[in-house]
């Protein structure tokens, strides 16, 4: 017993001694850094006006380094917490100013007042000091696993378990990392080109790469809702108009996201994939997790522990993290300006404008969001959480503006791979083993925008087809002139048409129709007539706007339309007068170029309560893989056509195959079932059969009790559609 206490005391003294050595070493290096900076920067002084001896100057530098270290350790976290409600973009820009202010305070409290610096110089000195101190501390911990673990716990705001050996080994946890917008083929190409060595190593180690097929709405709102909550029913696009409420739903608006999550929970009776000891990081939806950061549906919460912005505090509370991220942010803004200028000078095509606030938006997505989410995932693993789902949006954001393939996105993929490598390394120090699953929510399809190819937007074309006023520039385009002439001819014909009678005219339309609402979700367009409370039929639209459907269906930039029909239920319209009832729709005919599953995807969306009066899918060229986005995007997703509808799952070999051999994974809801099965394989049900207390969602009812699935059940593609 006494020997054990002596051994324990000796170990503690050994750890204390090593810690003291590291602290003194960091202090000494910081002091040396200050001396070097004082010699290089004229506006930074560590001597009195009359000059000091080298010994006196070194002592002053030591005072300043020690004071700055204490202030950053004690005051910095308080300042960051006070600024927690400041937008992250602003907080990132304030980092340098805050750090420089702490250095000025440190110089002010030096005895005899020998330290002085201009505010601009203080910012530079503080940034260098933080970087050097962080690098030194990391270097000292690299060869000491115990020290490295303690550093990780400190950087992620976690408390290390006191005696892990005394706790029974827990079952494996699971981390789901969503690489937003990285399609199956894009991942394979990146691996083949050597851009993602970490992913390549996993493939060589036997990890299974499985493609899956999205729903018609191939975008994060529909896919992530289905993946996390098991249902994306009635999500026809990224944005859509709901006639019954007069509401414009947009997937990345907090109020809309909250409502979508509430509907999914009510529909499935399932709180979500992460309801038991889960964490949701950087997502649109919570998945039922209590631990959240940068999650849109909880952005309005103000609870201390699960406030969405709390993830910022955990990360930015370490000044080294803050300075490194702020520096990377500035560098990314400069990189975007340089890359967009190069594309403009080289006259690259297709190309869109990338000015305004976009460089800052890109820097937020590729730097701040990435760093905060990765740090949060590291913290979750060190805390031993059971299930973590995190979304890294960097590639998706850049691909929209630069295209899915090229130098710009290659750089993003390299950095994402490094983030994955860091997470994998931290997993080795977690209190439980972790299985890391990579997946994506959709891919990206390249192509010139619809407006760039034809000189007018989808809204312009719809208005011209309705005979409504359009800008003069639209009338000068070929498409605009043809649509305007067709509308004029149709109106003349309608004036001489006899009044129709019979069942097809039983619904009276308003005498003065309102203008159509035209929305875009990548290469998927939606046209709604808000003054008509029901879903308009083809016959009703033809009576009101005789040229509209023909104008849209005949346009070379449009692949097909979906519209209800009083005679045939619903029909798909395409060029050359093609009209196919949805009930008879197959993957041939007008949908042949869109590949397998297109007919089922259209048929499912046709049954949604909030499907638009006219659903418009752009053309798709299978030879080039291109589509025409109805938004300002040269890499797009949202509809059918090409790589946008082919994301991936990459899982370790110890998990069961996503589908049986020869099977196909179809739809985000099926992916949800696969992920739930993998969680159950961790040794017991990870999605609970019952919850001790319901957690109400903002603006909604409490989450119902989630149902259980039979053990070992295979997810059969199309079973729920």
Image (spheres, rainbow, N blue to C red):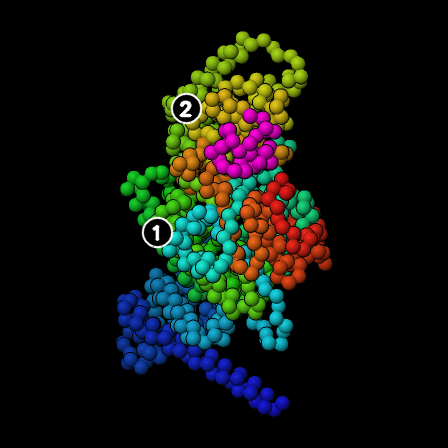
Asked whether 252 or 405 is in front, the reply is 405
In whole angstroms, how far apart are the C-alphas of marks 2 and 1?
Answer: 38 Å
The residue where tag 1 is placed is 335
**Most prominent secondary structure in the magenta stretch?**
helix
Q: Residue at x 51, y 50 (%)?
A: 210
Which residues, given as a range, are shown in magenta? 580-606
Side (left or right) of 39 relative to 14: left
Asked whether 27 or 252 is in front, the reply is 252
Res. 174 image quadrant: bottom right
Give the label on residue 716, or none.
Answer: none
The percent coordinates of residue 718 (x first, y second) are 61, 42
Res. 348 image quadrant: top left
Q: In this rendering, is residue 164 above or below 494?
A: below
The residue where tag 2 is placed is 479
Residue 240 belongs to magenta span: no
The percent coordinates of residue 128 (x first, y second) are 36, 66
Q: Residue at x 50, y 42 (%)?
A: 645
Quadrant where the N terminus sits is bottom right
Disc 2 secondary structure class: helix
Count of labels shown?
Answer: 2
The percent coordinates of residue 256 (x first, y second) are 59, 42
Q: In this rendering, is residue 515 above or below 632?
A: above
Residue furthest bottom as drawn: 2
Residue furthest front as drawn: 662
The percent coordinates of residue 284 (x first, y second) are 55, 48
Q: In this rendering, is residue 599 above or below 322?
A: above
User: Label 1: how many residues lie within 10 Å, few (<14), some (14-19) or many (20+)?
Assistant: some
Give the number of the mark in front: 2 or 1: 2
Asked whether 696 or 641 is in front, the reply is 641
């Amino acid at each position: 017993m006494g020997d054990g206490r002596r051994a324990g005391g000796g170990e503690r003294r050994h750890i204390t001694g090593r810690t003291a050595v590291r602290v003194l070493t960091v202090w000494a290096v910081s002091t040396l850094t200050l001396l070097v900076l004082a010699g290089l920067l004229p506006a930074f002084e560590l001597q009195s006006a009359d000059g000091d001896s080298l010994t006196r100057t070194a002592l002053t530098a030591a005072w300043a380094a020690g004071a700055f270290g204490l202030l950053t350790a004690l005051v910095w976290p308080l300042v960051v917490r006070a600024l927690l409600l400041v937008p992250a973009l602003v907080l990132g820009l304030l980092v340098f100013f805050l750090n420089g202010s702490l250095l000025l305070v440190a110089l002010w409290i030096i005895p005899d007042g020998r330290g002085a610096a201009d505010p601009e110089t203080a910012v530079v000195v503080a940034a260098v000091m933080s970087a050097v101190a962080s690098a030194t501390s990391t270097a000292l911990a690299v060869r000491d696993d115990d020290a490295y673990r303690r550093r990780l716990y400190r950087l992620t705001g976690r408390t290390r378990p006191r005696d892990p050996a005394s706790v029974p080994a827990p079952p494996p946890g699971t981390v789901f990392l969503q690489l937003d917008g990285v399609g199956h083929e894009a991942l394979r190409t990146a691996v083949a080109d050597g851009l993602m060595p970490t992913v390549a190593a996993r493939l060589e180690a036997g990890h299974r790469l499985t493609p899956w097929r999205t729903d018609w709405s191939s975008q994060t709102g529909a896919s992530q809702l289905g993946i996390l909550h098991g249902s994306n029913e009635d999500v026809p696009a990224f944005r859509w108009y709901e006639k019954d409420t007069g509401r414009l739903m947009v997937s990345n608006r907090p109020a809309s996201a909250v409502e979508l999550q509430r509907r999914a929970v009510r529909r499935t009776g399932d709180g979500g994939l992460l309801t038991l000891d889960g964490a949701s990081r950087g997502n649109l939806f919570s998945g039922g997790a209590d631990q959240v950061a940068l999650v849109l549906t909880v952005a309005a919460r103000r609870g201390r522990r699960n406030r969405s912005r709390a993830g910022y505090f955990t990360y930015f509370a370490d000044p080294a993290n803050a300075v490194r991220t702020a520096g990377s942010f500035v560098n990314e803004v400069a990189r975007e300006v340089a890359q967009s200028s190069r594309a403009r000078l080289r006259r690259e095509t297709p190309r869109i404008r990338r000015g305004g606030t976009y460089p800052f938006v890109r820097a937020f997505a590729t730097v701040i969001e990435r760093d905060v989410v990765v740090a949060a995932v590291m913290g979750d693993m060190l805390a031993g959480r059971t299930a973590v789902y995190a979304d890294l949006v960097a590639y998706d954001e850049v691909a929209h503006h630069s295209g899915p393939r090229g130098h710009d996105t290659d750089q993003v993929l390299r950095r994402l791979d490094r983030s994955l490598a860091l997470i994998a390394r931290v997993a080795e120090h977690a209190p439980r083993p972790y299985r890391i699953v990579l997946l994506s929510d959709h891919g990206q399809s390249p192509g010139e925008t619809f407006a760039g190819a034809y000189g007018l937007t989808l809204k312009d074309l719809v208005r011209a087809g309705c005979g409504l006023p359009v800008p003069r520039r639209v009338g000068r385009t070929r498409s605009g002139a043809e649509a305007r002439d067709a509308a004029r001819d149709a109106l003349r014909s309608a004036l001489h048409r006899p009044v129709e009678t019979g069942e097809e005219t039983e619904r009276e339309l308003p005498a003065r129709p309102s203008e159509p609402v035209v929305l875009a979700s990548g290469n998927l367009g939606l046209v709604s007539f808000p003054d008509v409370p029901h879903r308009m039929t083809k016959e009703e639209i033809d009576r009101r706007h005789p040229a509209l459907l023909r104008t849209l269906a005949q346009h070379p930039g449009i692949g097909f339309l979906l519209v209800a029909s009083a005679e045939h239920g619903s029909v798909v319209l395409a060029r050359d007068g093609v009209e196919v009832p949805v009930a008879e729709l197959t993957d041939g005919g007008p949908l042949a170029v869109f590949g397998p599953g297109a007919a089922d995807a259209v048929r499912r969306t046709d049954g949604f309560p909030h499907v638009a009066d006219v659903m418009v899918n752009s053309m798709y060229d299978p030879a080039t893989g291109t589509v025409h986005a109805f938004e300002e995007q040269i890499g797009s997703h949202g509809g059918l056509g090409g790589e946008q509808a082919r994301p991936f799952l990459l899982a370790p070999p110890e998990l069961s195959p996503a589908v049986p051999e020869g099977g196909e994974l179809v739809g985000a809801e099926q992916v949800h079932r696969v992920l739930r099965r993998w969680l159950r394989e961790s040794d017991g049900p990870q999605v609970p059969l019952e919850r001790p207390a319901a957690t109400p969602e903002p603006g909604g009812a409490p989450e119902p009790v989630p149902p259980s699935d039979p053990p070992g059940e295979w997810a059969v593609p199309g079973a729920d559609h």
